[in-house]
Amino acid sequence: MLRLSWFQFTLLNSILITLLNFNLFIFVYKNLQSFWLTLAFIIAYFSLVHSIFSLIFVKYLTKFLSIFFIISSCLSAYFMYFYGILIDSDMVQNIAQTDIKEIKDLLNLNLFFMLFIALALSVLILKIRIETGGGS
């Protein structure tokens, strides 16, 4: 069983979520045309994600929230990469209004591969023992 401190677990989650948003960073780079501004954006994004995770990853919700965010990020990364979209509030509304026919049209081998990766990461998360720093 893999053992990580709470900080290491939170840091690795933040790095993974940041990496899964590579399409956002490509979009930002194309619009800003500046490596340094894009790098500053990536660092700010990572810092924001890590700050949020540090606040919401509490003892009994850490693994559940981690799995939720990783599956959500894998799916959104898939749709951003293969369909060239950015996820916003309109996209979330479209997801809620999708019917069975549209869902069948979206199912393909790439989506199942991404779901497999997300589920493999979820199993890994469940096997990790998170050590908290509490004690004497």
Image: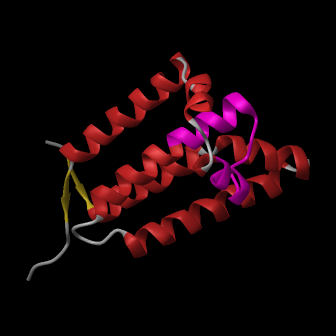
- Left-right relation of 135 to 92: left
Residue 31 lies within the magenta run: no
Name the residue nearer the viewer: 130 or 135.
130
- Left-right relation of 11 to 64: right
Question: Residue 42's x, y, as percent?
Answer: 68, 55
Please give the name of the residue rendered at 46% of the width and 23% of the height, measured from the top-left corner.
Answer: 112
Position of residue 117 relative to residue 92, above or below, is above
Q: Residue furthest top?
A: 109
Position of residue 123 relative to residue 114, above or below, is below
Name the residue nearer the viewer: 106 or 136.
106
Q: Quadrant of residue 127?
A: top left
Name the residue nearer the viewer: 126 or 3.
126
Question: Residue 105's x, y, as percent?
Answer: 62, 23
Q: Which SS does the magenta portion mostly show?
A: helix
- Left-right relation of 10 to 79: left
Position of residue 86 relative to residue 44, above or below, is above
Colour style of the rendered protein structure: secondary structure
User: Which part of the image, by quadrant, shows the C terminus?
Assistant: bottom left
Residue 77 lies within the magenta run: yes
Please give the name of the residue rendered at 29% of the width and 72% of the height, measured from the top-left corner.
Answer: 58
Question: Residue 117's x, y, as percent?
Answer: 41, 30
Instruction: Look at the image and give the residue range highlighted in magenta.
Output: 74-94
Question: Residue 21's x, y, as percent?
Answer: 62, 46
Please give the name of the residue rendered at 35% of the width and 38% of the height, measured from the top-left corner.
Answer: 121
